[in-house]
Image (cartoon, rainbow, N blue to C red):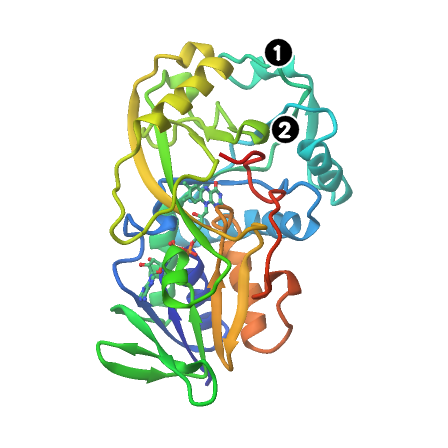
Amino acid sequence: MKSVIVVGAGIWGASLALRLAEAGWQVTLVEQHKPGHVRQSSAGETRLLRSAHGVDEWYTRLAWRARDAWRRLGERAGVTLYEEAGMMWFAGTPDGWEHASSQVLKNLDIPCEVLDPADGGRFFPDFRGDDLSFLLWEPHAGVIRARRATQVTAALAEAAGVRLVRARAVPVAGDGAPYACAVEVDGEVRQADRVVWACGAWLPALFDGLPISVTKQDTLHFAVPPAWSVPETPAWVDHGASAYGHGDVDGVGMKATSDAEGRPYEPEHGPRTVDPESVEQARAYLRRRFPSLAEAPVLFTQVCQYALTPDAEWLIAEAAPGVWLLGGDSGHGFKHAPVLAEYVTGVLAGDHAPEPRFGLHERQEARGLRTSGRIG
Ligand SMILES: Cc1cc2nc3c(=O)[nH]c(=O)nc-3n(C[C@H](O)[C@H](O)[C@H](O)COP(=O)(O)OP(=O)(O)OC[C@H]3O[C@@H](n4cnc5c(N)ncnc54)[C@H](O)[C@@H]3O)c2cc1C
């Protein structure tokens, strides 16, 4: 039986541990806190699932498969992890990101519908779209209960035989290679056939020279009348304005927040309070798009962090023989986790190499994969 140590029990590490155990590997999962702890990116209350990815077919296909995976995982755990409320894209130009997305979705037979901005009133209790060119409706998109999903995945992994160790792992220097296929935990070196560092925003501090920067992201939920709840009110993204959100899920309020990258951030000790400017920014967007919510009170906030690569492509790379880095999710990795885990399991087994796009090479700035079309 092949052995693997996965470091980090966010949704990427936990999903991978589960998949590897199911594929017959002996798995140790090392996590410095608890799966679902509030500092990890995966502990956001909710995360969006969408198939649209601009011109990119690879991520579009992956997200479409992930939809089924989340439904199956929820059924297996007896919990609704994914709410299929649909997603509305607000397109500011006729031939931009949303148009490219619609073409790819149609080519791949993923349902979508191009609508007039005036149709927005059918989907939201109150909507102003007079600045928009069109709306793109993705009926099979929605909202994942992220923190819950992370805890459920970690619990399923343990039930599948994964050994969960609560400790901080440290890389071990290699003999003739930069790193050994081992981790140091509480002063003890543990070896395995493979080691995967799935450490989210902590990864760049563990390994030098990675193309990953970490930013503070404030998330806001507003108190809204019952009509603004999922599934009656869908998820929405305004790519051009870097704004997104969804109707109330589980009483934490309607999410309305910015995807523009915040200031540099340290995930372990950085402040977990949102900035007043973030509230103002979200409110300004609500005022413009959903005017009746202009004075809605803030009900719930969370601080999270992005681990961004310049081109928003992930990092899936072998740093030394058997030592794999899995990170740089760039703010769009949650939805894909169960199927990404399948893909990485194939990489670790040697069934296929990772796509060149995920390598350690220098990256060019690009925004096509993010839900944010503008910087700052
Ligand atoms: C505000 C916000 C909104 C987002 N919205 C979406 C969305 O709508 N849709 C979507 O698909 N994605 C979204 N994302 C991205 C998504 O949340 C991430 O892609 C995903 O959570 C990344 O998971 P991860 O497991 O890589 O990292 P994390 O969840 O951060 O987990 C990393 C784990 O590694 C552990 N760790 C680190 N170092 C060590 C060590 N040395 N030893 C032991 N343990 C260690 C940490 O404690 C942590 O638990 C969003 C992210 C943010 C911040």
Residue 120 falls in which quadrant of the image?
A: top right
Where does label 2 land, which residue? Answer: 137
Identity, as a three-letter code, of the amino acid under mark 2: Trp
Residue 8 falls in which quadrant of the image?
A: bottom left
Q: Position of residue 65 (x, y in %)?
A: 60, 51
Q: Secondary structure at mark 1?
A: loop
Q: Position of residue 370 (x, y in %)?
A: 56, 42
Of residue 351 and residue 266, the one placed in the foreground of this image is: 266
Quick check: 73 above or below 368? below
Q: Residues within 10 Å of mark 1 (few under 14, many from 20)?
A: few
Numbered circle sitting on residue 292 = none
Horizontal arrangement in the rendering, residue 167 relative to residue 231 (left or right): left
Which residue is pictured at 45% across the width and 80% down the height? 178
Q: CA distance from mark 1 to mark 2?
A: 17 Å
Q: Position of residue 365 (x, y in %)?
A: 60, 48
Which residue is pictured at 51% across the width and 62% down the height? 341
Q: Is ligand 1 within 8 Å of the beta carbon of the residue shown at mark 1?
A: no
Identity, as a three-letter code, of the amino acid under mark 1: Asp
Which residue is pictured at 74% across the width and 45% down the height? 108
Q: Earlier in the sequence, mark 1 or mark 2?
A: 1
Quick check: 216 above or below 178? above
Q: Residue furthest left?
A: 186
Where does label 1 land, which residue? Answer: 130
